[in-house]
Image (tube, grey):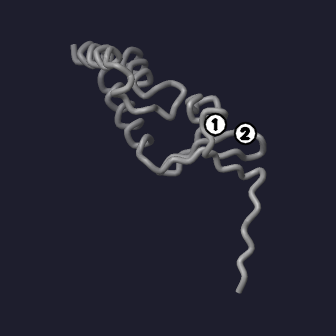
Amino acid sequence: MMKHLLLLAIRVYWKIPTKWHQKCIFRETCSHYVYRKASERGFKAGIAALRERNELCRPGYVVYLSQGHYYLKTANGTVFEEQEIALSELPPCNKHILDLDNYVPKQIEY
């Protein structure tokens, strides 16, 4: 019963115009991830997935390029590979990517 209420709540959320949603940093959006987990494993797994994504989606993430691959590092230090990152967070959509492949530290004069 609780599983079905959670799934219904997510389906209602999907009906809300996207301008009212926050942009997700993951390729599988948070709501789709929670829906999938709840569908597969039940209410408790869905709530656990919701908590997990809530912790990861806190402000402070960075997308960076290293050795030709893109990575997303969340505020808690978890690193995700390119196939898990939302396309809106990758070039050409995102112009604010830390390029470690071409990083040249500034010289500090004393």
Mark before the other along the chain sequence, 2 or 1: 2
**What number of labels is visible?**
2
The percent position of residue 77, horizontal first and vertical second, equals: 52, 51
Q: Amino acid at mark 2?
A: His
Q: Which residue is mark 1?
A: 81
Label 1's element? strand
Viewer-side residue, 46 vs 73:
73
Q: Amino acid at mark 1?
A: Glu
Residue at coordinates 35% horizontally, 17% vertically from top-left?
14
Circle 1 packing at 10 Å, graded few (<14), some (14-19), many (20+), is few
Compared with 30, 110 (above or below) is: below
Residue at coordinates 56% horizontally, 48% vertically from top-left?
62
Circle 2 packing at 10 Å, graded few (<14), some (14-19), many (20+), is few
Compared with 49, 55 (above or below) is: below
Quadrant into which the N terminus falls: top left
Q: Which mark is residue 27?
A: none
**In the picture provided, is 30 more to the left or to the right than 70?**
left
Q: Are marks 2 and 1 in contact (CB under 8 Å)?
A: yes
Residue at coordinates 59% horizontally, 28% vertically from top-left?
87
Quadrant into which the C terminus falls: bottom right
Q: Which residue is mark 2?
A: 69
Label 2's element? strand
**In the picture provided, is 109 more to the left or to the right than 96?**
right
Viewer-side residue, 79 vs 57:
57
